[in-house]
Image: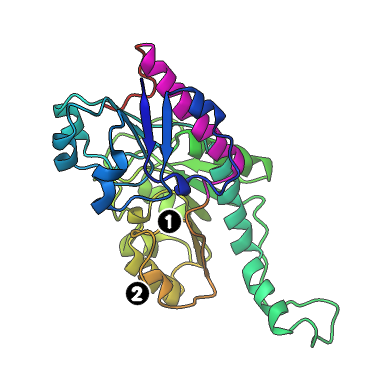
Amino acid sequence: MTKVVFLDYDSTSRNDLDLSQLEASCTSLTTWPQTKQADLISHIADAEIIISNKVIIDAELLEKLQHQIKLICVAATGTNNIDLDAAKHFKIPVTNVRNYASQSVAEHSIGLLFTLSRQIAAYQQAVARGDWARSHNFCLLDCPITEIAGKTLAIIGYGNLGQATTRLAKAVGMNVMIAERAGTDEIREGRVSLDTLFNEADIISLHCPLDETTRDLVDAKRLQQMKPSAFLINTARGGIVNEADLLEALKRGDIAGAAIDTLEQEPPTKDSILLSEQLPNLIISPHVAWASQNARQTLLNQLADIISGWQRGELINRVV
């Protein structure tokens, strides 16, 4: 018998997904909308396999359940919520899902760029205020609109997400430069240094993981290197951008605008730095770049494949 518990199912579904493949991969599937840390033990109950998107699985929990838990499946690519060292110590394999949201993230990244370059949010607000109805002309020209064709988009993080974004950018006539990895001095063919990238790019789009080399990668120094006309897009992780530095850069006009899909703390608190002021050159979406229906269904189906594979003695997408 294989009992599976999904600790935070509502983080992946709005009741629009087909669970049949995941249900067929195990003897029983229990889904909890959310799980607070205080409820972890009771929600896990006698399950052998844990699925967690963002619920924290720490060393203390793993020690308590080391003889019960046979597999941890992270319902995301990032595994920051799992104590991987502890999982390895207790010989509990951890897997993740991969390349399930590349198209969704790429489309969202380019969509955010269009929102900035064409001032879509500003014009929507103007229409809602009645500015268009009061106009003496057939149109409003209150906010400058910039075409992105011919502009240079810089990609930081050239994995599946960066490559998918590159394909869409080239399809609309953009030039693309690719950053060399942070923390390395050797520049490979086809890559550029971060200094070159921040100095020359018209748009910078982040697609790298958050680790010790990328935390606060975009700080005051890097923002001041950027062109005053440049845009910053972040659909990666919040900690890659120093939020206080970004706020000040936007207020001073160091860069033209930023569009952010991730914050350092999620969900944000009421005093979140980037939510503290309503800036016309800042667009924030609530960590939904990955969340097309297609991508979320692919995620569930990958989880089913991982669990089925584990039962056959195969470990797909093993992290530790």
Which is more N-terminal, label 2 or label 1? 1
- Judged by depth in the image, the label closer to the viewer, 1 or 2, is 2
Numbered label attached to residue 105: none
80 is within the stretch colored magenta: no
For the residue pair 248 and 4, the one nearer the viewer reads as 4
Q: How is the image coloured?
A: rainbow
SS under mark 2: loop
Residue 55, percent across and down?
A: 32, 47
Left or right placement of residue 87 versus residue 309 in this view: left
Residue 142, percent across and down?
A: 69, 79
Q: Amino acid at mark 2?
A: Asp
For the question of whether residue 175 can be seen, the reply is: no
Q: Quadrant of the C terminus?
A: top left
- Residue at the image position 47 percent from the left and 49 percent from the top: 10
Q: Residue 212 occupies which quadrant of the picture?
A: top left
Left or right placement of residue 41 versus residue 192 in this view: left
Q: Amino acid at mark 1?
A: Thr
Q: Principal SS element in the magenta part?
A: helix
For the residue pair 158 and 105, the one nearer the viewer reads as 105
Q: Residues within 10 Å of mark 1 (few under 14, many from 20)?
A: many
298 is within the stretch colored magenta: yes
Find disc 1 in the rendering and name its residue. 262
For the residue pair 105 and 69, the one nearer the viewer reads as 69
- Residue at the image position 64 percent from the left and 50 percent from the top: 150
Magenta span:
289-312
Find disc 2 in the rendering and name its residue. 271
